[in-house]
Image (tube, rainbow, N blue to C red):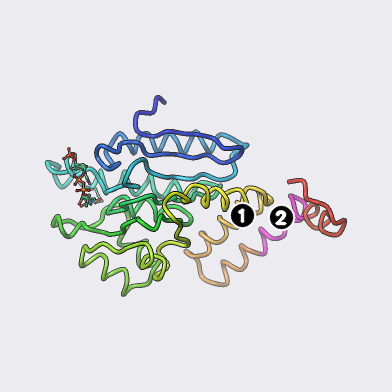
Amino acid sequence: MEYEILQLSVDENIAIVTINRPQALNALNSRFFQEMDAMVSQVSGMPEIRVMVITGEGKAFVAGADIAEMVDMTPEQGIAFSKTGQNTFRSLEKMEIPVIAAINGFVLGGGLELAMGCDFRIASSKAKFGQPEVNLGMIPGYAGTQRLPRLVGLGDALMLLMSGEMIGAEEALRIGLVQKVTEPEQLMEETLKIARIIASKGPMAVKKVKYVTRAGRMMHFDEGCNLESEFFGTQFKAEGEEGMRAFLEKRKANF
Ligand code: CO8
């Protein structure tokens, strides 16, 4: 696909996807979702890629769904647009490799929902977070009502969802919405540092950690433990033997 909004760059075995529509603060339109679906397929088909990073160009990561595109929608179109976004963000969770959001600025509404579809989030100290849908007389439509309380707990989630107010990066860190805050100019460097650490590990082990951890959250605890044992077992011959032998032989594992 010819991308108009997304840009893909590759840094060794890390894919960096930049949302590049800064004139509209990277607001999410239908075209974005087509491109993101294509990007997920493309990157999933690149066996050398071990981590994907998503970031935004300009002063926003994403300032929400495109209000200009939504304003005239019928209820049926609204449901369809909501499902489109939900499916795209779910596909990030379903990617085998880790997906990291590098949040460079405003991350609002659908933008925060995109960031929450990623496996974890690193933010510039200048980033501003919010679910401002109620300011527009709307509610989130890309699973924000479902992911936010799972990430930060019910009280903090409802305060953000009901007030529509923005919070800063330090507050986002405090409530667990982001995992790390950096100086703005250090954001990509710090994100890539973590991405490279992950990329240096056993790639199948990292994929299995993602799968078992995410799948386990939807399961009964004992069922999740059974899944963990099963995947633990399969890792011995997949990568574990090499990893453990390398440790005992005091050398770097060849993953
Ligand atoms: N959609 C469309 N255009 C936008 C959006 C947006 N979400 N956000 C900003 N823009 C545009 C502005 O209209 C402006 O365009 P122009 O230059 O042509 O006038 C340009 O981007 C720059 O924006 P501002 O001039 O407003 O920049 P400021 O620095 O003054 O303000 C803010 C930045 C505070 C981020 C401000 O732009 C703002 O409040 N934006 C809207 C934030 C918002 O309400 N987001 C939530 C949208 S709703 C949503 O995401 C629901 C998701 C689920 C949808 C389910 C589908 C049905």
Placement of 20 over or under 131, stated as above or below: above
Q: Is residue 69 magenta?
A: no
Give amino acid for label 1.
Lys
Dot 2: what SS?
Answer: helix
Residue lying farthest right?
A: 249
From the top left corner, tell me how far across and down residue 94 is, in percent: 49, 49
Q: Residue at x 37, y 65 (%)?
A: 172
Left or right: where 246 falls relative to 139: right
Give amino acid for label 2.
Thr
The residue identified by callout 1 is 208
- In magenta, the rendered stretch is 229-240
Residue mark closest to the camera, 1 vs 2: 1
Q: Nearer the viewer, residue 164 or 225?
A: 164
Q: Is residue 237 magenta?
A: yes
Neighbourhood count class around disc 2 (C-alpha, 10 Å): few under 14, some 14–19, many 20 upward: few
Do callouts 1 and 2 mark residues in contact (Cβ within 8 Å)? yes
